[in-house]
């Protein structure tokens, strides 16, 4: 039903993209049954065979390799295009956490939570999470040690003013009083924000 009645051309582009992805997934499943093809991309197979070292980042009691970490918590380099119409907030917007009362700026988002299962269980329990998640760098005036949070959409709302954090200049080149402007490399990942 959504495929037939988009609200705008960007919505139509998003739903067409999703439709093509769904067709590709169905086709891959059918072909995979007959020919036993792997769903892995060629690049992923080379990365696995060329792993260098055993560098692990400790997060709580669990570990995540740096390779795994790059695609999690809003950290994927994959361009978010087309932009899904249900993503409420944009990269560069200043927000405030409804529960913990800190302010921050959005530096990334995922359409659905992208984190290890153990992290999801620890943070959200058994609740099924089916909503956008945002990566936020937290204002150091609200948290003395520089921090980054991965937050559900329902837990944030728009705020105002600039943010103080050592990573601001890494992601953004300017602030217009309402929103931060992404650096070109960051704009390539979020072209519609």
Image: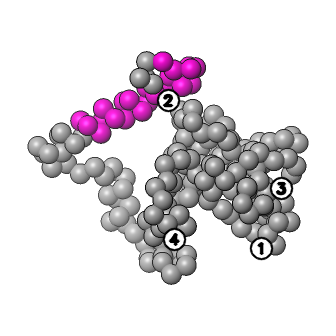
The disc at residue 145 is: 1
Can residue 180 be seen here? no
Position in image of residue 18 (x %, y %):
42, 33
Graded by Cα atoms within 10 Å as few (under 14), some (14 to 19) or many (20 or more), the crowding at tag 1 reads: few
The disc at residue 163 is: 3
Q: Main secondary structure of the magenta part?
A: helix
Nearest the camera: 67 or 128? 128
The answer to which quarter of the image holds residue 9 is top right
Tell me the residue at 32%/58% (across/down). 45
According to the image, label 2 marks what residue? 14
Q: State which tag comes first along the sequence, 4 or 1.
A: 4
Graded by Cα atoms within 10 Å as few (under 14), some (14 to 19) or many (20 or more), the crowding at tag 4 reads: few
Give yes or no for residue 9 being in the magenta stretch. yes
In the image, is 154 to the left or to the right of 84? right
Alpha carbon separation for disc pair 1 and 3: 14 Å
Graded by Cα atoms within 10 Å as few (under 14), some (14 to 19) or many (20 or more), the crowding at tag 3 reads: many
Tell me the residue at 44%/76% (across/down). 53
Tags 3 and 4 touching, CB below 8 Å = no
Q: Which residues are magenta?
A: 5-27
According to the image, label 4 marks what residue? 122
């Amino acid at each position: 039903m959504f495929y037939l009645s988009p609200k705008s051309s960007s919505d139509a582009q998003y739903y067409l993209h999703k439709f093509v992805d769904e067709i590709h997934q169905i086709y891959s499943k059918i072909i995979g049954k007959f020919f036993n093809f792997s769903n892995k991309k060629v690049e992923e197979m080379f990365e696995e065979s060329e792993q260098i070292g055993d560098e692990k980042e400790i997060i709580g009691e669990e570990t995540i390799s740096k390779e795994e970490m790059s695609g999690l918590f809003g950290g994927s380099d994959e361009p978010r295009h087309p932009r899904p119409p249900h993503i409420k907030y944009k990269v560069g917007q200043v927000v405030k956490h409804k529960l913990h009362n800190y302010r921050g700026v959005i530096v990334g988002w995922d359409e659905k939570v992208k984190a290890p299962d153990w992290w999801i269980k620890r943070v959200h329990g058994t609740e099924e999470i089916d909503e956008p998640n945002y990566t936020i760098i937290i204002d150091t005036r609200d948290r003395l040690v520089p921090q980054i949070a991965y937050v559900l959409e329902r837990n944030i709302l728009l705020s105002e003013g600039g943010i103080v954090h050592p990573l601001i200049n890494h992601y953004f080149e300017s602030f217009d009083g309402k929103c931060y402007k992404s650096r070109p490399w960051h704009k390539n990942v979020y072209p519609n924000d």
